[in-house]
Image (tube, helix red, strand yellow):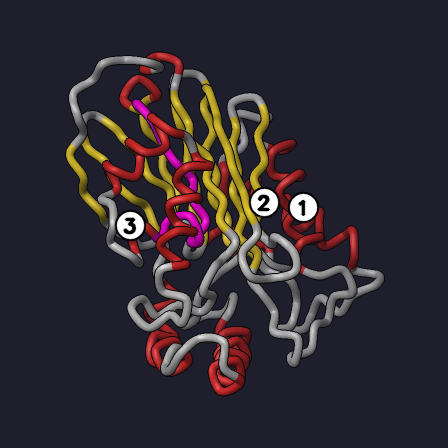
Amino acid sequence: MQVTVSSTKGVGVENEDGVFVGPGAVVVLDGLSAPKDLPMACVHGTPWYVRQLGARLVALMGNEEQPLAEVLRTAIGDVNSMHSSTCALDQDAVPASTVTMLRERQGVVDYLVLSDSVLVLDTGGTVRAVADTSVEAVAGPEMAAALAGPAGTPERAARVSELVAVQRGLRNRAGGYWVAATDPAAAEHAITGSVPAADVRRAALLSDGASRLTDLFHQLSWEELLGVLEAEGPAELISRTRATEHSDPDGIRWARFKVSDDATAAYVELGAHRHSQDPPSRPDRFDEGE
């Protein structure tokens, strides 16, 4: 497995994404931002949580007999133990993150997707994007209302804070949506799967700040996005994303919560297909359920 990565900060003070690579393992996390006017029950904050969770995930993925959902469950519990004495982990206002994982083992590629980051797989001549869109299903109207009007205004900021308050009440409970936070049971709600490694030509793990050229801006197909990653690398994909963001500084053409979001991309080539001359793949976006 050959992995190339890039991660850059958006408009925030700190990059709340994380990318972690180990032998045969890749993890991309997208920490959920917390507006400053809302309380936070953890003294450490989202970037700390992302770093700790990512490090534990990569370490645990080395046990190839452990399914990825169990890896995630264990990692969430391990991070809980690191700050349960200092933080109120029974509250809604705790750090949280999306999770995307890929592991190659014994001729098989395993994957896991939790919340709205994206995994793109090129398998058997077909490009498919695996995404969990449950947050849109349960909070779609509130999300649309929060995006009304130009970005960067106090009114927009107030609506986004209201949305986050609503989303916190929906996280990690029946009828809501699931993210990595303090409840290890969230792992049971992730999208998981396995495919023969011989069928996987390439893959990409993307935070939603790095998938925008396709699923928000509609500038590239998933196949074309993989082509940029293959030919020019993750840094170029993010550079093109920034250029598109800058062309719409007020978020009028493409309504979005952050004009420029943290963006992280990991591009993976499997050994059997590295530098191969396979024919072009057929793009096919689909969102899998639980």
Percent x, y for residue 16? Answer: 60, 54
Vertical order, 282 against 186 (above or below)? above
Residue nearer the viewer, 65 or 84: 84
Q: Which residue is mark 2?
A: 18
For residue 190, say whether it is visible: no
Left-right relation of 137 to 89 = left
SS category of the residue bearing label 3: helix
Left-right relation of 99 to 143 = right
Image quarter (top left, top right, bottom left or bottom right) of the N terminus: top left
Q: Amino acid at mark 3?
A: Thr
Vertical order, 54 against 244 (above or below)? above
Q: Amino acid at mark 2?
A: Gly
Pointer 2: residues within 10 angstroms few (<14), some, or many (20+)?
Answer: many
Percent x, y for residue 102? Answer: 45, 33
Q: Is residue 205 magenta?
A: yes
Report the Cα–Cα distance between label 3 and label 2.
21 Å
Range of residues picked out in magenta: 201-212
Q: Amino acid at mark 1?
A: Arg
Residue 290 placement: quadrant: bottom left
For residue 100, say whether it is visible: yes
| Residue that lies at the very extreme toward the right in this rendered image | 85
Residue nearer the viewer, 290 or 149: 149
Of circles 3 and 2, the one toward us is 3
Q: Which residue is mark 1?
A: 51
Q: Residue at x 49, y 87 (%)?
A: 155
Between disc 3 and disc 1, whose residue precedes?
Answer: 1
Q: Residue at x 41, y 30 (%)?
A: 233
Percent x, y for residue 132? Answer: 36, 55
Q: Which residue is mark 3?
A: 214
Vertical order, 100 against 157 (above or below)? above
